[in-house]
Image (cartoon, rainbow, N blue to C red):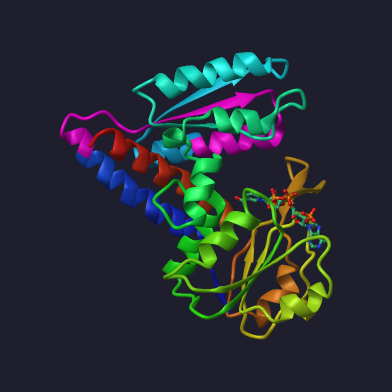
């Protein structure tokens, strides 16, 4: 069994990006600029945004966090998005999800200019990705594919089973895995899937993205499979200062001995999601500075 180290891989990619950025700034160009809009004070969102700011520092990017209280109106948020769409000094921006209930997330997502949508959530980017056109790829799927490539995990002709059909993980990952060059045979499972255990047992690459701690057990995994654990659920843990620990969707202790490759939680997919955001921001910067 080989552990797929997302933390080390992401550090390497950030260093590669920082090298490129240092060359641009040495030529007198401005650094790439990523903006994050953070609404309210959700603990998870605060952590994600703080990690994105740290990643920007590591890559040599400028980052700005714009905070709004949870009672911000949808119109105010849309006006802010419009300003950022028009700001030539902002290469890309994200609106950290989830948003308070009174705000329509889809409307907000669609208000972001596709050329600045570095999360890759806008329907234009999702559509372009699904037909293999240049676009901003959704961050988590792109990070997973990057890990598979860097660890030389064979994908051509392999059965890839994805548990979860969300718009940010399962669906866009399915589109990427079936693309020419990756060439996996993809099955997407969800809460209505019959015989889930048997379907999973057929997987050469099993991706768990359902948000249920330790859902994937050893009897669902074929010997020699590659297992990618996307799940990050906060589970109460009184021994931790934070009061919780992050738990993946895979029973790592019992599943890992059967695998060729497996990602841990934390330190697997999570850091790669952030690094994909950095790659998308660099791509946005490069197309703005052609
Ligand atoms: P989501 O929107 O809640 O979707 C969960 C999916 O899992 C749904 O399609 C659901 O099916 C399916 N599902 C739930 N229970 C199931 C069951 N018993 N059997 C089969 N399928 C089941 O979740 P998400 O946003 O994709 O996130 C999934 C997990 O990944 C969460 O823990 C999240 O925190 C984590 N995540 C991590 C990263 C990262 O960077 N590491 C990024 C994004 C998400 P239905 O569609 O039928 O309801």
Q: Is residue 266 visible?
A: no
Of all residues, the one furthest to the bottom in this rendering is: 223
Residue 76 position, x and y percent, is 61, 13
Task: Pick the quarter of the image with the N terminus.
Answer: bottom right
Image point 48% across, 57% down: which residue? 131
Q: Quadrant of residue 96?
A: top right
What residue is rendered at 80% in x and 72% in y?
Answer: 196
In the foreground, 66 or 192:
192
Q: Is 110 above or below relative to 168?
A: above
Closer to the camera in the image, 278 or 128 = 128
What range is drawn magenta here? 24-52
- Asked if residue 63 is positioned above or below residue 287 in the image, the reply reads above
Position above or below: 227 against 130? below
> Is 202 inside the magenta-drawn segment?
no
Q: In this view, does 252 lie to the left or right of 16?
A: right
Residue 32 among those drawn in magenta: yes
Outermost left residue: 27
Left or right placement of residue 12 versus residue 6 in this view: left
Front residue of 131/66: it is: 131
Tell me if residue 146 can be seen.
yes
Q: In the rendered view of the protein, which quadrant contains the C terminus? A: top left
Q: Measured along the vertical axis of the image, is residue 117 above or below residue 248?
A: above
- Picture coordinates of residue 230, whole percent (x, y): 65, 58
Of residues 171 and 283, which is closer to you in this image? 171
Image point 34% across, 50% down: which residue? Answer: 15
Q: Quadrant of residue 161?
A: bottom right
Q: Residue at x 77, y 61 (%)?
A: 190
């Amino acid at each position: 069994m080989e552990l797929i180290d997302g933390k080390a891989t992401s550090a390497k990619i950030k260093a590669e990006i920082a090298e490129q950025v240092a060359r641009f700034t040495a030529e007198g160009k401005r650094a790439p600029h990523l903006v994050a809009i953070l609404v309210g004070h959700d603990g998870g969102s605060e952590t994600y945004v703080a990690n994105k700011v740290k990643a920007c520092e590591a890559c040599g990017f400028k980052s700005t966090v714009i905070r709004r209280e949870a009672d911000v109106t949808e119109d105010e948020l849309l006006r802010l998005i419009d300003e950022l769409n028009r700001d030539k000094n902002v290469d890309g921006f994200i609106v950290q999800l989830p948003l308070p209930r009174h705000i329509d997330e889809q409307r907000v997502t669609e208000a972001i200019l596709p050329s600045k949508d570095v999360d890759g959530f806008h329907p234009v980017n999702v559509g372009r990705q699904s037909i293999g056109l240049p676009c901003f790829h959704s961050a988590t799927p792109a990070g997973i594919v990057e890990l598979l490539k860097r660890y030389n995990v064979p994908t051509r002709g392999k059965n890839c089973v994805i548990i979860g059909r969300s718009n940010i993980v399962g669906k866009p990952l399915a589109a990427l895995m079936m693309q020419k060059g990756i060439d996996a045979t993809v099955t997407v499972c969800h809460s209505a899937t019959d015989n889930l255990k048997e379907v999973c047992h057929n997987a050469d690459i099993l991706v768990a993205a359902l948000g249920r701690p330790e859902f994937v057990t050893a009897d669902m995994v074929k010997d020699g499979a590659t297992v990618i654990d996307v799940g990050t659920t906060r589970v109460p843990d009184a021994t931790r200062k934070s009061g919780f620990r992050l738990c993946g969707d895979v029973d790592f202790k019992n599943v890992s001995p059967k695998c060729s490759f497996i990602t841990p939680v934390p330190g697997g997919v999570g850091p790669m999601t952030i690094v994909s955001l950095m790659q998308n921001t660099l791509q946005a910067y490069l197309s703005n500075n052609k």
